[in-house]
Amino acid sequence: MAVQPPDLATVRPGADPAADPLDAGPRPRGRTGRRARRRTGKGLWIPGTILGLIVLACFVWPLVYRDLPSPTAGSLLQANLPPFSPGHLLGTDPLGNDIVSRLLHGGRVSLEVGLTSNAIGLLLGGSLGMFAAFRGGWLETVTMRLLDMLIAFPSLVLVLVVSTYLTPSKLNVIWAISFFSIPTFARLARAATLRLREQVYVVAARLAGARDSAILLRHIAPNVLPQLLTYSLLWVAAAIAIEASLSFLGFGVPASEPSWGMMISRGQAYISSNPELVLIPSACLFLTIVCLNTLGDALRARTGAP
Amino acid sequence: MTTQIQPDAAARTGDPDAPLLTIENLEVTFRTRDAPVHAVRGVDLTVYAGQTLAVIGESGSGKTVTSRAVMGLLPRTASVRGSIRLGDRQMVGLGEKELRKCLGREVGMIFQDPARSLNPTMRIGSQLTEAIRVHLPLDRRQARERAVELLAMVRLPAPARRFHEYPHQLSGGMRQRVMIAIALACQPRLLIADEATTALDVTTQAQIMDLLLDLQQRFAMGLVLISHDMGLAASYADQVAVMYAGRVVERAPTREMIAHVRMPYTRALLDATPRLERPPHAPLPVISGRPPDLRALDPGCAFAPRCSRVRERCRQERPELAEHQPRHEWACFFPCADDTIPGEDER
Amino acid sequence: MTTGNGTGRPLLEVRNLVQEFVVRAHGGVRGGVVHAVSDVSFEVRAGETLGVVGETGSGKSTMVRSVLQAPPPKSGEVWFQGVDLATARRRRDLVAARRQMQAVFQDPYGSLDPKWTVFSIVEEPLAAYRTGDRRQRRARVEEVLDLVGLDPSVFGDRKPGQLSGGQCQRVAIARALTLAPALIVCDEAVSSLDVLSQAQVLNLFERLRTELGLSYLFIAHDLALVKQVSDRVAVMYLGTLCEVGPAEELYRNPLHPYTKALLDSIPSPDPERPRPRVPDELAGEPPSPLDPPSGCRFRTRCPRAADICAAEAPPVRAARPDHTVACHFPLSPVAPVSPARHGGDGAAD
């Protein structure tokens, strides 16, 4: 008889370390869930709120507040206004564009690029990895080797190549960045699927007569998705950073659509006279990325994903 | 090969009649979000040199928590009250550093899963040598010699060769032998085996138990077997303590216990164990229900809801463990008479 | 309940089953073929329980998986209700057979998807076979949950994480029962449960056997446990069957030295019985299935081994009606004839 004695050294992810070994009956999941929430509460709610505010400001404020000046149609007459000038809370840049409006617009571009490239990676990469791992055999080998080749490329160089070849536009930047998110998500999904495929309940489902597609959709995907989602938060941060680097180097989105990276790049020339031109967008970029990373870490700790 | 080991052990066993381990009124409570979990609720146990005590219980009975409390291996959420004396040293409230000094030197422990107790990236030899050098002032070469000696002592085949191997190259039984060697590296006076043979095959289990009893005799160690298996306890232990819901509910010398079971829970355990003597397809007499929730316990006997002999008094009042017959203690108001089967007699 | 016994053939008949795996150890070095199951034949008759005992590495779990065709065996025949599953290339035959052959595995938590409710877990086979409409399925799920002693209104919406080990195992049994199978394969199904919940589940298996006329292929490493539920017992060592016989007789009068060693190793709750004693020869470790011994697989640990044991594999011989052994020197004399097959026609001659 191999009765598992309670083992204090091994606590299942998400389980209550004290109650688990002494488990005397049903596992009250609600309780352990609450506990975990408290433990990671700060890491979850603070960055979550800040991110929510940033998203609201970037996407909703321009819609609600109609008087917001256009980010690109500034007048040279109003160039280089200092912060707290009437009508221009953070002042204007050397071309007379309102900085608040540029910031909001830039944030929108950054987030759009980050989220979209991420969604592409998650969907395409995730399903590729899952499918490859589930089917196994030569299909898996070929798919994964191809994706490995993508990963092996120095990322920035590839993005540069792609975005110079294609005309600079937001869409092309998104595709360029997706080139990295796809293999990363695919590998993650593959690793998770390989682990799940060996789970007894997957074998049991097959013995119960479930078809491959049903197993993939109903057993594998729901268990892989939380891991991918958690990881994707970290990827949004990375994608935003890549977009900023591209814009900084001048290969990003076109000048008609300011992004944070572009603002930093343009502001560079004036760093001694008007340091706020660089500092303010940098601070926004920094805050967003830090929040995304902390949130991702907190979620990962909570779901117990690797 | 054991000449080096023997005299030291003999020197340390001072008074042979003094108990090695005395646990008095031990209580362990785990803090959780909503209600504290009372894992161990007043346990008294004594182990003498050269004696084997089996602690029997299901998961959640508190047997493992008790043994971990002795080793100071409980998580931070645990609060420990009561007294655990090893020789004449009080272990409860001991600082981490002093505790560590004690562990290994005074008391060794082996666990159920030898695969996870060994570091997969280190050679057997290095792990053993490390364990020796933590406690004994030996140089590298001496520690090595000692390690090979220990591996031979636990009857690991070809110890000098195995010394250079990694855990994954050994079978489960061999790994458990290595764990025993590590636990015995400093000749502790007390060895706790927590389900040490549960994961092993029966033939391997028999060999490991042989080895453990042999070593115990040689070094006059106290041995505590934590197990769920009545058969193991009956075959190898001098004394058996049965735990239920964090308390010892019956304790007696093994023969006395099996021959005259008093506690209805012990009876239920014995009856529900499949035995070679039973004919196939005979239904196992088994009680229904599950162990109580250790967060919210009623004032009465914890076993009352599942007990076939329960009466009103059992729900109101908690029976204490007491020596009702010479050397036979139980915690029950209405103990089984000899040869009763639960449910068969009147309620 | 159809058991497929109309023709007088056994419900499940396994002939010369072989399962091997190629392992590539690090960088292709030290690779080889794991001979997990080598030429195993046995049968399970309608309405009976065949217990299979063996130690870790004996290949009993692999054997079960091969019977279930997950993954299919390398060679050999698995006849179930008149269909050879191993050669049933048409998916439909396999699927139809699987409906009648369900499994319960060891790990109570691992065999249930943690994200599903008890209700949907038990419903899954019905959904997979597109059986009945929603209301019929619901009724069936409630029926089988009742059958295994779980109140559907209480447990239906719970998830595996909210259940105890014993309750999880009941859910797994309920899932196995939904399609009204003829055979349930139990792979260490109660091994990870506590003594009392183990006894409860064992009694449940027995009740279902008599109520539904089920057959079981019951795999475990615990001999006492196997005896509790089995009509006949097969002893497995290193991928081969040593001995197959009626439970009572095999335990009372073992013929194979390995069976005897196993029986002698079990500690009994009766303190009057002698302490388990293992012959010195057995003290060694079982050989690796990567490189099994020639001839009789048990010879390296056998106290009775002689030259012939290394030279040739022992034939399966019928000792008594229905009791077969594969040993050159069995513990009591057996008939010199050798055309018997384990658990097979031995009874006939």
Image: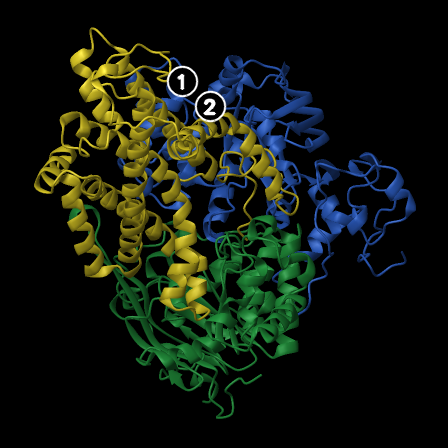
Chain colours: A yellow, B blue, C green
**Residue drawn at the location 61% of the way across and 42% of the way down:** A30
The residue drawn where x is 43% and y is 23% is B5
The answer to whether marks 1 and 2 sit on the same chain is yes
Quarter containing the C terminus of chain B:
bottom right
Query: Badge 2 is on which residue?
Result: B6
Tell me the distance, in whole angstroms, between the alpha carbons under discs 1 and 2: 20 Å
What is the secondary structure assignment of the residue under circle 1?
Answer: helix
Crowding at mark 1 (Cα within 10 Å: few <14, some 14-19, many 20+): some
**Residue type, numbered disc 2:** Gln
Chain under numbered label 2: B
Query: Dots 1 and 2: beta carbons under 8 Å?
Result: no
The picture places residue C325, in percent across and down from the top left corner, at 42, 74
Q: Quadrant of residue B95?
A: top right
- Quickly name the residue at label 1: B134
Residue at x 27%, y 38% (from the top left corner):
A113
A70 in relation to C116, above or below: above
Left/right of residue C140 with respect to residue A111 in the rendered view = right
Residue placed most toward the observer, B303 or A280: A280
- Res. C127 in view: yes
| Closer-to-camera residue (A97/C157) | A97
* Comparing labels 1 and 2, the label whose residue is closer to the camera: 1
Q: Where is residue A233 shown, x and y percent of the image?
A: 36, 36
- Image coordinates of residue C16 in percent, x first then y, are 33, 76
Judged from the image, the secondary structure of the residue bearing numbered disc 2 is helix
Q: Quadrant of the N terminus of chain B?
A: top left
| Structural crowding at the residue carrying mark 2, measured as other residues with C-alpha within 10 Å and reported as few (<14), some (14–19) or many (≥20) | few
Q: Is residue C114 left or right of residue B63?
A: left
